[in-house]
Image (cartoon, helix red, strand yellow):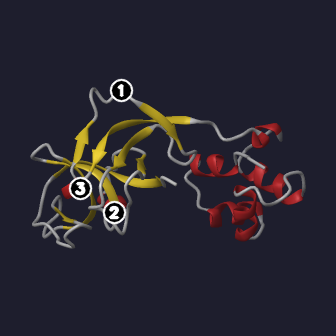
Amino acid sequence: MANRFRELREALGWSRDRLAAEAEINPTTVWRYENGTAPLLNDAARKMAAALGVRREEEVLLPPTSSAARLIGRVGAGAEVYPIDDGSETIPAPPTVGDGIAVRVVGTSMVPAYREGDVLFAEQAADAPEVIIGRDCILQISDGRRLVKKVLRGSEPGRFRLFSYETQDISDDVELVWAAPVRWVLRDP
C-alpha cells in the first residue's frame, strides 16, 4: 500500500537506521513499511509515525506527494547534455527526488551504467564536495558544458576529475560550476 513513510523520513534527513532507532523497531521493519509490504495500522507503524512527528494516521496513509523535474536535455556521446528547446518541459519525478532536473539518455555511449531511454533524475546542486565524490552527477563545468559523469577527487581542493563510462578514461582536473547527484533512474522498459 502506498504511504509517505520514506518521504517523511527523507524530509527530516534521517536514514532508515535513524528512524528505526527513534521508533525502537528493527531497520528491516522500516524498509518493509516504506516499500508497502507491511500492514499500516499496527504498533510499529504508529511508533514510526510518532517518531516522524505525524499527528494523524491519515498523514501517513496518503500517497507520496508528487513533484516534477525539469527535463533539461538529452545525454549522449561524450556524456554531454544537449539542451531541449527552452528547458520548460517537466516530467513527474520519483517521490524521493522532489523538484529537480532530469536528462534522457540517447544512444549507447553510457552502457553499462545507463541505457538508451533511461531518464536520470537529480535533485539539486550539491554544495559540499563530499556529497558528489564517487557519485554520478548531472553537472556543469567551467567551460559551460553540461555532462553526466562520475565525479572523483581532483589534485587540489575545488578541482575534480570526471570518469567517462564510454571510454573508461578519467579527465584532468576540472572546475565545476555545479553538480547534482543522480538520485533515481527511470528505466525505459
Q: How many marks?
A: 3
Question: Spatial distance from mark 2 to mark 3, Cα to Cα?
Answer: 22 Å
In primary-sequence order, the first of circles 2 and 3 is 3
Name the residue at 15% across, 61% down: 159
Query: What x and y, as percent, mark residue 130?
Result: 33, 63
> Element at badge 2?
helix
Side of 87 where 160 appears, left or right? left
* Number of the label disc, if any, that sits on residue 103: none
Residue at mark 1 to residue at mark 2: CA–CA distance: 30 Å
Residue 88 - label: 1
**Residue carrying label 2:** 130
Q: Is residue 38 visible?
A: yes
- Closest to the camera, between mark 2 and mark 3, is 3
Q: Disc 1 on helix, strand or loop?
A: loop
Residue shown at 75% from the left, 38% from the top: 62
Compared with 76, 25 (above or below) is: below
Q: Is residue 59 left or right of residue 8?
A: right
Is tag 1's residue or tag 2's residue first in the polypeptide sequence?
A: 1
Residue 13 at x, y = what percent?
Answer: 55, 52
On the image, the x and y values in percent for residue 23 come to: 76, 60
Q: Amino acid at mark 1?
A: Ser
Of residues 184 and 113, the one drawn nearer to the viewer in this rendering: 113
**Of 31 and 78, which appears nearest the observer?**
78
Residue 157 quadrant: bottom left
Where residue 79 is drawn, which disc sits there?
A: 3
Please provide percent x and percent y for residue 95: 58, 45
